[in-house]
Image: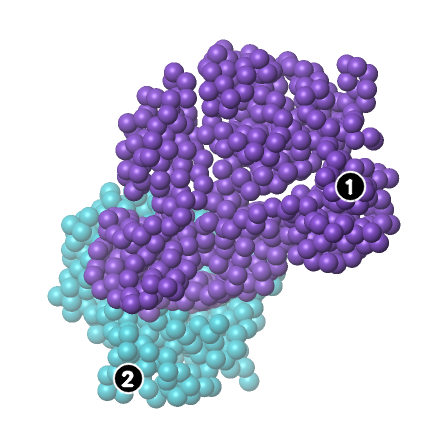
Chain colours: A purple, B cyan
């Protein structure tokens, strides 16, 4: 296929605005899938994605479209995730495209996250095609949308396509706009004759090794070609190239400008870095393509196997997950309460939840995750030069030696209907934020800019925002450096013994209430024992919360005669076996599920 | 020569109805032919085992409801026992009775067949508690049965009581105890209600009030002690010398043969249980044998012994299942002493008050896994 008949685009949309259904319609219309094959939301491979209505992995699809002018085009759609945590993947997807569909729910209007992604796309020089979806809903308000699109995104209203993925309205117009408005793949400014292909993403197949999703920028790739990864300088022989249609379909070559997959016997994803440039071994390019900025995790949490014997399996599973998701980081650590496990880094809270869910579902791992943390910068007294990064409360130095602790802050763009401005400002204050400014978006919507501690965002800010604004509020954020804050380590003590899994770094003003909540919850989940158990929340030496679990009054089988002995022994064996699996903190036995319950409740 | 058993247990698996709290094996609907086969098999098994049923210390006939046997059935049953078993001079021969199915004629038959101890299932003297338990026997039936038994010449009589029943207040239990004590019997068993799996009660209630149950447990000891009745095991109280020898010996690890469906046996080395199914038992279904290593068996025996207030004499502990457990388990004994679950008294190790209330925790210490 010649470059002039290739179009590469992605879709930018907020969750639930209809990205997947539009994509399905496009595939259906171009006969990429037959009506029979059309499962709902073809692109979302993972159950989890379907359940949450979000796409996490960028998954390219190739469609053939015969235009009104009777010309056959290859259109490549590179999916993007719609959630704030995955802005990183969005930018990756955008780098492989020349255009983007901006899908807006005509009843909901533009959302904060969409604005951020559109700005990203505009910055990368992409052609934006705005699509107002769900136009047939009674609540649809195209005028509001036009106003927003012009006001916030500076896109003329005339460019909008009205559509309804449900009824199929506007799908033909969208396809025509893709071939008409989106430019063909550009030539490289230099070395245009040399092979340069960008690794946009990868997945791992246990039989075939790493599958790279690539965008060919110049020259082409065929099976049996010898290629070189420019970052690692390793060479491979290409086994297969092809496109997703939407299942993997081998082709003779990947032409310049096209998007597809490449298999080359690469055993380890570490060898094929996302953002790396593939070139030819015989005739290598000198300069690699501009790669991606490596994103650093913002949220950390410990993940431990419930059964300590599963440590190796968990390690293996995490390795496999990381193959598909290099933004997820893990490193071995150990906890007195939880044993051996991993400190893991995530892009955000949703990313964390998704990784945990995938470990549970796809890898059948029984895991327990600790309270999420961010990276704090700790400065010791008398030494302002050396900063100690702390991502685990357990590693916080002795408070008496600390000069100050700085926490990461973010700048949030929060878009809300004007009616909720008071409530949202109160929420921002409650979460230790500062409102930096407000701007009217249209006659009903306001964009609030606020600075907030990342830790507060990580915990429940987004959920609270949604509930305060009845689902109409949305937010986007970007890192905004570090700021000193009166932070303390809250420890939970069980009969005077600190339980490391429950330790957390919190703002001084929130420590007591959090300590109380944790103590109450611990009281609920730790079973009574032969002696009374004191549960305390402590900051340094001072106790800020206290609960007592009263002693068990008895543990006796009232009626026990000859006939009961064997049965009784089996019962006792089971109990003792159960206790062996419990964590012993001092004299107190804490069942594993108590940790799970507490950590779940506190997240 | 076969090693003789110390005791014999016979299980009579027939009941008028199944009480809501009870998980002991019994059947309510049975044909005459089934009962006849049952009695025949009891007879032949006693006969087969007669070589090892000599000079026994005790016989215990439990159920089910032994008093549910008809006069001719009971006659045949007791004759089988007397034909094939010999007893020592100070023997104890107990039969469990339900006040609603016992009659003067049956009592006389029992007395004339050598039975010298009766155990009545009273459970409660108050209607409210009985109705929660699904227990149909009335207070007047209990009065009548006890009077008859005393008149016919039985002295060694026990009644079973249950406390900690949902809805039962401490005052209700006090009334139960007062009524029970008015019979002036030498032995009482008072059980804290257990919600046994697969019982009607366990479906209705998920838990019992442990706090209240312990208060009732304390009240029991307090009230019974005024009548010279001493707690000698977690749930058993007797006047001096009137404890149930059969059960006491089992707690202390003595051997016994159990005959009948669901009956268990212990010969000092292994335990075995007959199938909990009358038809299959009649058909000759093999028992389930539980062979456990000497160390585990010794642990089991010791923990059972610690259910008795007098615990173990150290000399006894020097040989349990062939092991000198006094040295072999000394760490466990020390731990239990440190946790104040057992204590040393002269030459014995005895459970503390707390140790009785935490008998299962004591038992767990002797589980080796």
Name the chain under label 2.
Answer: B
Mark 1 or 2: in front is 1
- Separation (CA) of disc 1 from disc 2: 96 Å
Q: Residues within 10 Å of mark 2 (few under 14, many from 20)?
A: some
Asked whether the beta carbons under mark 1 and mark 2 sit within 8 Å of each other, the answer is no
Depicted B5 relative to depicted A433: above or below: below
Q: Which mark is residue A20?
A: none
Q: Position of residue B226 (x, y in %)?
A: 12, 66
Question: Is B175 on the left or on the right of A563, as rendered?
Answer: left
Residue at position x 48%, y 58% in the image: A343
Q: Position of residue A297 (x, y in %)?
A: 50, 50
Depicted A488 relative to depicted A383: above or below: above
Question: Is A137 on the left or on the right of A31, as rendered?
Answer: left
Q: Which residue is mark 2?
A: B348
Quadrant of the snapshot with the N terminus of chain A: top right
Residue at position x 33%, y 35% in the image: A436
Q: Position of residue A557 (x, y in %)?
A: 35, 62
Instruction: Please name whichever residue, B351 or A303, is drawn nearer the observer in this view of the structure.
Output: A303
Circle 2 SS class? strand
Instruction: Please name whichever residue, B259 or B127, is drawn nearer the observer in this view of the structure.
Output: B127
Residue at position x 47%, y 23% in the image: A152
Q: Which residue is mark 1?
A: A192
Tell me which corner region of the image, top left, top right, bottom left or bottom right, holds residue A101.
top right
Circle 1 SS class? loop
Instruction: Please name whichever residue, A54 or A46, is drawn nearer the observer in this view of the structure.
Output: A54
The answer to whether any part of residue A82 appears in the image is no
């Amino acid at each position: 296929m010649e470059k002039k008949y290739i179009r590469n685009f992605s879709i930018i949309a907020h969750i639930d605005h209809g990205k997947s259904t539009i994509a399905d319609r496009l595939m259906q219309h171009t006969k990429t899938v037959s009506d029979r094959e059309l499962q709902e939301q073809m692109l979302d491979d993972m159950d989890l994605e379907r359940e949450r209505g979000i796409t996490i992995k960028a998954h390219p699809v190739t469609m053939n479209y015969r235009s009104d002018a009777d010309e056959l085009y290859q259109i490549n759609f590179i999916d993007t995730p719609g959630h704030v945590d995955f802005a990183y993947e969005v930018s990756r997807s955008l780098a492989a495209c020349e255009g983007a569909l901006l899908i807006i729910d005509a009843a909901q209007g533009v959302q904060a996250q969409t604005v951020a992604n559109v700005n990203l796309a505009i910055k990368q020089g992409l052609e934006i095609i705005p699509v107002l979806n769900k136009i047939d809903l009674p609540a649809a308000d195209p005028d509001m949308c036009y106003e927003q699109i012009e006001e916030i995104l500076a896109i003329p209203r005339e460019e909008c396509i009205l559509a309804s993925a449900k009824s199929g309205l506007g799908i033909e117009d969208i396809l025509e706009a893709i071939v008409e408005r989106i430019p063909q793949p550009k030539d490289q400014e230099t070395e245009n004759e040399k092979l340069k292909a960008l690794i946009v993403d990868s997945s791992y197949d246990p039989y075939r090794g790493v599958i790279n999703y690539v965008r060919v920028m110049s020259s082409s790739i065929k099976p049996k070609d010898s290629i070189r990864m420019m970052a690692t300088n390793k060479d491979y022989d290409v086994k297969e190239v092809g496109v997703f249609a939407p299942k993997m379909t081998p082709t003779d070559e990947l032409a310049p400008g096209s998007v597809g997959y490449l298999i080359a016997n690469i055993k380890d994803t570490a060898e094929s870095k996302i953002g790396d440039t593939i070139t030819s071994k015989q005739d290598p390019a000198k300069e690699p393509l501009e790669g991606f900025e490596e994103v650093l995790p913002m949220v950390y949490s410990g993940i431990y196997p419930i059964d300590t014997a599963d440590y190796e399996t968990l390690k293996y599973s995490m390795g496999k997950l990381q193959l598909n998701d290099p933004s997820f980081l893990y490193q071995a650590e150990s906890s007195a309460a939880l044993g051996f496990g991993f400190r893991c880094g995530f892009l955000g809270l949703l990313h964390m939840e998704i990784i945990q869910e995938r470990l549970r579902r796809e890898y059948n791992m029984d895991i327990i995750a600790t309270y999420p943390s961010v990276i704090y910068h700790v400065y010791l007294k008398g030494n302002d030069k050396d900063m100690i990064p702390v991502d685990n409360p357990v590693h916080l130095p002795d408070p008496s030696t600390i000069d100050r602790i700085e926490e990461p802050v973010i700048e949030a763009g929060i878009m809300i209907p004007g009616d909720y401005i008071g409530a949202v400002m109160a929420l921002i204050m409650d979460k230790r934020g500062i409102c930096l400014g407000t701007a009217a978006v249209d006659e009903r919507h306001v964009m609030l800019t606020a600075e907030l501690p990342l830790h507060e965002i990580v915990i429940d800010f987004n959920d609270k925002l949604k509930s305060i604004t009845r689902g109409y509020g949305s937010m986007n954020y970007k890192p905004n450096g570090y700021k000193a804050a009166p932070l303390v380590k809250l420890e939970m003590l069980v009969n005077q013994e600190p339980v490391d899994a429950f330790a957390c770094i919190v703002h001084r003003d929130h420590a007591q209430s959090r300590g109380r909540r944790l103590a109450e919850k611990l009281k609920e989940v730790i079973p009574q024992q032969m002696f009374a158990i004191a549960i305390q929340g402590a900051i340094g030496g001072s106790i800020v919360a206290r609960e007592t679990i009263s002693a068990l009054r008895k543990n006796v089988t009232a009626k026990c005669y000859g006939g009961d002995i064997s049965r009784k022994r089996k019962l006792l064996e089971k109990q003792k076996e159960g206790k062996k699996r419990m964590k012993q903190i001092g004299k107190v036995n804490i069942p594993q599920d108590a940790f799970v319950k507490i950590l779940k409740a506190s997240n | 020569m076969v090693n003789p058993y110390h005791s014999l247990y016979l299980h009579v698996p027939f009941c008028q109805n199944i009480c809501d709290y009870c998980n002991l094996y019994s059947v309510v609907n049975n044909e005459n032919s089934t009962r006849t086969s049952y009695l025949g098999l009891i007879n032949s098994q006693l006969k087969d085992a007669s070589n090892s049923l000599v000079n026994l210390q005790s016989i215990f006939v439990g159920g089910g409801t032994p008093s549910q046997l008809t006069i001719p059935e009971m006659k045949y049953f007791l004759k089988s026992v007397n034909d094939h078993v010999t007893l020592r001079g100070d023997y104890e021969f107990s039969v469990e009775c339900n006040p609603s199915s016992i009659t003067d004629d049956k009592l006389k038959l029992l007395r004339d067949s050598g039975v010298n101890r009766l155990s009545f299932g009273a459970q409660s003297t108050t209607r409210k508690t009985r109705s929660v338990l699904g227990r149909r026997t009335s207070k007047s039936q209990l009065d009548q049965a006890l009077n008859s038994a005393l008149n016919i010449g039985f002295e060694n009589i026990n009644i079973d009581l249950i406390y900690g029943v949902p809805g039962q207040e401490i005052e209700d239990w006090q009334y139960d105890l007062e009524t029970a004590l008015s019979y002036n019997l030498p032995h009482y068993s008072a059980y804290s209600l257990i919600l046994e799996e697969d019982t009607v009660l366990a479906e209705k209630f998920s838990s019992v009030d442990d706090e209240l149950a312990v208060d009732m447990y304390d009240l029991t000891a307090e009230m019974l002690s005024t009548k010279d009745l001493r707690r000698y095991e977690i749930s058993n109280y007797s006047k001096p010398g009137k404890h149930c020898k059969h059960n006491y010996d089992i707690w202390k690890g003595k051997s016994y043969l159990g005959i009948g469906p669901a009956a268990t046996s212990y010969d000092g080395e292994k335990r075995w249980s007959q199938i909990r199914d009358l038809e299959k038992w009649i058909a000759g279904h093999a028992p389930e044998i539980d062979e456990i290593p000497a160390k585990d068996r010794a642990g089991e025996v010791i923990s059972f012994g610690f259910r008795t207030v007098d615990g173990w004499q150290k000399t006894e502990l020097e040989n349990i299942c062939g092991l000198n457990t006094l040295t072999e388990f000394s760490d466990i004994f020390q731990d239990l002493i440190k946790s104040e679950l057992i204590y040393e008294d002269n030459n014995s190790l005895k459970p503390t008050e707390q140790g009785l209330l935490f008998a299962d925790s004591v038992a767990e210490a002797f589980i080796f896994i």
